[in-house]
Image (tube, helix red, strand yellow):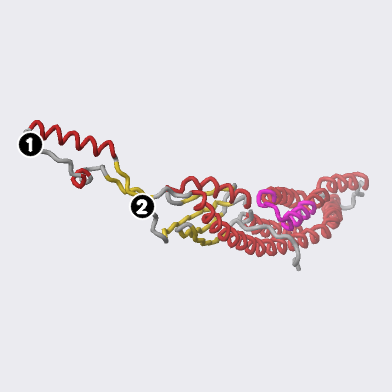
Amino acid sequence: MFTGLYMANSMTGFGRGEASGSGYQFSIELKSVNHRFLEVVVRMPRYLSSFEERIRKTLQDKFQRGRIEVHVNVVEIEERKRLVKVDNDLALSYDKTLKELALALHTAYETDIYRLVSFPEVLAVEEAELDLDALWETCSQALSKATDGFGQMRSSEGEKLTIDLLQRINLIAEYLNTIAERAPYVVSDYQERLHERLQTLLGEVELDGVRLANEVVYFADRASITEELVRFDSHLSQSREALRSSESVGRKLDFLVQEMNREINTIGSKANDLKIGQQVIKVKSELEKVREQIQNLE
């Protein structure tokens, strides 16, 4: 029924991606829940914190709403090169101090390099500096895979929501048609009831036809729901159009539902008719279901 249409996206989704390179394996998971705006929360090792803003920017370019949690796990799959550094100044200072001590104690002293390097901080093992550009290349590959799966799930969930919402909108339109068909009879029924009531009260006294007609005209004007029905139909059309859009539609639909609720409340109060009232209740029930569903749309 709705095949071939653009579909709105859901705000809930999950995606996972992995990539290896430069001696590391990156595993990235994305998951999101409903949120009024876009919020990106990144959890990753501190030594890669410079990647956080790039990850956030990547997601901001692709998604518009939802609270997205990003979990970045990194495993070292190749041992990093380690270098031994010598603090020459410190070693020379140790040697000079030992010579001075030997002289003060009148003791012979010979420089022993093996003893010197055993003193604290003369030798230090340092890991090779990380190539952050190469690591980002691997990280971005894993992020791209996670984002693809994440986006596909949001799209799939959004398609299901869109189909359900379009069906509910069509059902609401049917209820409105029933209201529109009933509306002309509201005035005639009122005229008939008013005539019967006055006839009962006045008995044999002749009714003033002009005053009766004026009262009916006044009621017809006060009870007219034509404008509300036209606006409601416009809101339904805008909702269908929004749902068939590939853009973010959640906030727009939320506004349209508020407007439709306002119109249906006015219809119910103005018409003051049992049969229309029954349809109004059905419309309100469906609008509440629509409102709940669109909270999940991006």
Residue closest to the eye, 103 or 252: 103
Query: Is the Cβ of the residue at disc 2 closer than 8 Å to that at disc 1?
Result: no
Determine crowd level at label 2: few under 14, some 14-19, many 20+ residues with C-alpha closer than 10 A. Answer: few
Magenta extent: 233-252
Count of marks overlaid on the render: 2
Q: Residue visible at 89% across and 52% down?
A: 204
Pick the quarter of the image with the N terminus.
bottom right
In the figure, 259 relative to 15: above or below? Answer: above
Residue 46 in the image: state x and y as whole percent.
Answer: 42, 48
Q: Is residue 215 magenta?
A: no
Q: Which element carries disc 1, helix, strand or loop?
A: loop
User: In the current view of this chain or complex, which residue is farthest to the left?
Assistant: 106
Give percent across and percent down for residue 226.
83, 50
Q: Residue 82 shows which numbered tag? A: 2
Q: In the visual, does 136 lie left or right of 270?
A: left
Compare residues 78 and 109 and report the one nearer the observer.
109
- What's under tag 2, amino acid-wise? Arg
Q: Name which of mark 2 and mark 1 comes first in the sequence.
A: 2
Identity, as a three-letter code, of the amino acid under mark 1? Thr
Mark-to-mark CA distance, 2 and 1:
39 Å
Tag nearer the camera, 2 or 1: 1
Q: Residue at x 60, y 48 (%)?
A: 60
Residue under label 1, please give it: 107
Viewer-closest of 130 and 114: 114
